[in-house]
Each structure stands twice: as structure tokens, then as C-alpha cells.
Amino acid sequence: MTSDVDIPPAADPADPAGPSPAPAPREPSTWVTLRSLLLRLHFYAGILVAPFLLVAATTGLLYAASFQLENIVHSKELTTSVPAGQQRLPLAQQVTAATAAHPEGTLALVRTYDEPDATTQVLLDVPGLPESTRLAVFVDPYNGEVRGALESYGSSGALPVRTWISQLHRHLHLGEPGRIYSEMAASWLWLVGVGGLVLWLTRRRRAGQRLRRVVAPERGARGLRKTLSWHGSVGTWALVGLLALSATGLTWSKYAGANIDVLQTSIGWSTPSLPVSGGHGDHGGHAAGQEAGAAPVADADQVVQAAAGKGLSGPLEIVWPAESGKPYVVKEADRLWPQRNDQVAVDAATGQVSAELRFADFPIGAKLTRWGIDVHMGVLFGLVNQIVLAVLAISLISVIVWGYRMWWLRRPTRGFGTPYARGGLRRLPLAVALPLAAVAIAVGVFLPLLGISLLAFLVIDVVLGRVAASRAGKAEVGESSESGAGIPG
């Protein structure tokens, strides 16, 4: 009769020492340990940070369509019928119509557009509006009719529909505390993406199928293998775009954004300002301390003509002086590639250009920042840009959903062994662990929310590891006691 219990082999008479003992298990290589550590970090980020990324991707998908929604919802204010052969009114007359309709406001700036059916926007500072918000008065450029007034947010001139979507994406309408979610998502996105790519590229595959299985889902796969195949291949295709969104998104963040500003200043990559007194070169174009009627409205057309003489064209933004005697600032506001972003200052008394700032003279870092922000907002390449953003958002949502499905398919209650072994950091050689720790600290200081959350994960991991080890030790002691109790003394 056979038994299911393993029977030790009989001693070999020729070998008095008996059978050779089983060889001791070898210590894993440094790379295997590093990969195990990266896998566990990727697992933690997927479980705990993915919800932030999922919200950011979903709201970002909605923002990608916000320009079309804005044009539809606010079409009455944004457009006008164009009578055949009718000429535009002088800009000064259009501004007068807007300020007469809303005398409670202080003239801040005017936006003009190339499209023949576009209205002129006259922006007023009105008491009681939220920060960075002005009242935009829409004027028919052909007959001076005021077609409506809406709140306009930020330097992009977002109207209520796009503003609501933008703030949902930025801080979930929770104000400053809500910005933590978006900064957390942007801080972790690059780490999750690059770490996932390394894990995906280092999986063992048959030589003839390596490249195809990296960039395309595996044919005929089922279950967990199929889900992993889609998770890895789609993530690989989307990675470059997601890294760009992470980098540009961090420029708007509260804590990492401040560090980015310091870095740009230290290496001379700050966005230059137009060299005029009165401080009109700020990012938002706000004219602080402006007084109603400080500059003569009749000069508006002369100002535009002076700017045109220096080559400025296309959509224009004319910033009114903060006080009498200060210059006007005229900015090209074309965000489509190839961009027109030149600026000039026009003396209010003489109507002559007194200073110029050419986008071609910007430092390369300032240009990259401008282009990156416009790509992130979906305006640099127009509709194509928005479609790419939508595809990236859908890809990220899909990768996250597939990641959660993989966790569910191999959850502990199904009896799978976990590949996310603890203790990888302790097993690394000092020559590897110390530089790795130094890099992690440096990154954590530059991206504070990433550093704090990563430290929290490590602390939780150590605590869970100690608890698991303690339980395992107690279980072994219990088993030894039970075994000993059955042996007669």
C-alpha cells in the first residue's frame, strides 16, 4: 500500500553519510530584488493612488470637449450674424457700448478676434466677482449691440461652462484643499507609468514574440493573462503622452509648482516680461489698481494701429493702463500652432510703440512651458489636440480598470500566491540601496506630495510586514506545541 506521505530514501551502503542534504536556497540577485521592490511599489500605487488618477482622467476627458460645449452653450454671446458688406465699427465705439451697458465695472482689457462672426469681448473688473474672474461683455462689432455678459475666468478667458469643468478637473470644486488630489495624481503618474513600463519590458517572453507582445495585446490569451496583456500594451503606447501631461500638470500645482518656478528662475527659463512700468507683463494680464476712465477710450483704435505697424496680428488682447499716463499693452493671443505671442507697449500720449517683446526671443524653457501648457489645455493643435487628449484619458481609464481587474482575479481569497513580497529594500546591497534612497529623498523634496505619500506607504508596509511576521511566528509555535503534545515523554 502506498502513502501520500513522502518517504525519505534509504541510506546508501556505499555512502555512510547518507543522502546529500538539499542545497540551501540561493539569495535572489540584485535585479530580482529591485524588480520585486518595483512591483510592490507599482501594486501600492495602483491600489491607493489610482483613484486619484481615475478622477483626473475622467474630468480631463470632459475638459477635452469643453471648448465645443462652450461654443454651443454660449453661442448667443460668442457669435453674431454678419451682414453682407457691412464694416466693423471703430473699436472705441464698441468699448463705449460695453462700458455704458455695465457702468459698475472698471475697464481692464479688450479681446478682438479674426473670425468675421465673432463678437468683441470687453472685460471689466467688477466688485464681488471671484478671484481671477472678470465680467466679459460681448459686443457685436458691426452694430455695437451688447449681446450679453458672462463671467470670464483666467488668462484663457474661460466662460461659465468651461470654467466649471476646468475647476472640477483642477480641484473638484473644493477650493485649495481639493488641489491636493490633482497634484497627487500628477506627481505619481510618471512614477507609476515608468515603473510599469520597466516591469512590462522585463517580463519573460519567447524571443520571437517579445516585441509584438510588448506593443500589442496577446492573441488567444484568456483571463488574467489577457487582462495583463491589454494593461501593458495600451500603457506602453500611452506613456509618452501621459508623461507630458504629468509634467505640464505639475506646473499648475501648489507645492511642486512652487519648486518648478524656483528651478526655472535659477536656470534662466522664466517667462520674460514686457519692459514697461506699470507691471503689465504678469501671466494673467490683470491691471491692479486701475481707475475707471483712467485712459482715454478714444485711443483704442490708434493703439491697435500702432501694434499692427509692428507686425502684431490675429486675435489681440489690449490691456488698459492701470492709471493715466501708463502705456497700453497689446498681446497677440493666437494659441494655435504656429503661435503668435508677440507683445508691444504703446504710449498713451503719443500712440507710438515704446517697448517690444518677441516670442522668438523667449528662453527655450519659457517656450517649452508655453507650448506644454497649451498642449495640456488642448489648444495648441486645435481639434487634433483635443482628440489626442481624449484618447489619452480613455487609455488611462482603461489601464486603471484593467489593473483593478488583475488584482481582483488574483485576490488572496482565491488562493494565489502574492508576487508582491515585502522586505525588498532590506535585501538590497548598500551600494544600491543608498543611491536609491538618495534619489527617492531628492524626488520627494521636489514633489512633496509624492514624498509624503511614498513615506506613508513604506511605513504601512513595514507595519504590515511586522504584523504578518508576528502572526506567522505564533502559528509556528502553535504547530510545534501541538506536535510535541502527541509524543510520549
Image (cartoon, rainbow, N blue to C red):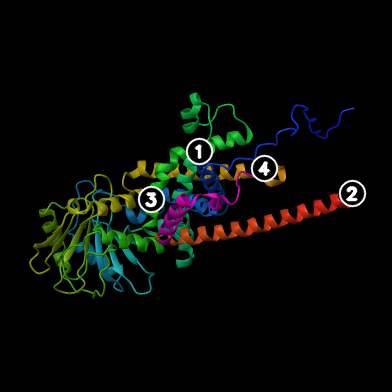
Rendered residue at 47%/62% (across/down):
180
Q: What residue is shown with label 1?
A: 200
How far is mark 3 from mark 1, CA to CA? 36 Å
Q: Which mark is residue 417?
A: 4
The answer to which of marks 3 and 1 sits earlier in the sequence is: 3
Q: Quadrant of residue 91?
A: bottom left
Q: Amino acid at mark 4?
A: Gly
- What residue is pinned by disc 2? 487
Q: Secondary structure at mark 4?
A: loop
Q: Quadrant of the N terminus?
A: top right
Q: CA distance from mark 1 to mark 4?
A: 20 Å
Is residue 374 found inside the magenta-colored segment of the image?
A: no
Q: In front of the other: label 4 or label 2?
A: 2
Give the amino acid at mark 1. Trp
Q: What kind of secondary structure does the magenta stretch mostly adopt?
A: helix
Residue at coordinates 48% horizontally, 36% vertically from top-left?
Answer: 201
Residue 127: image quadrant is bottom left
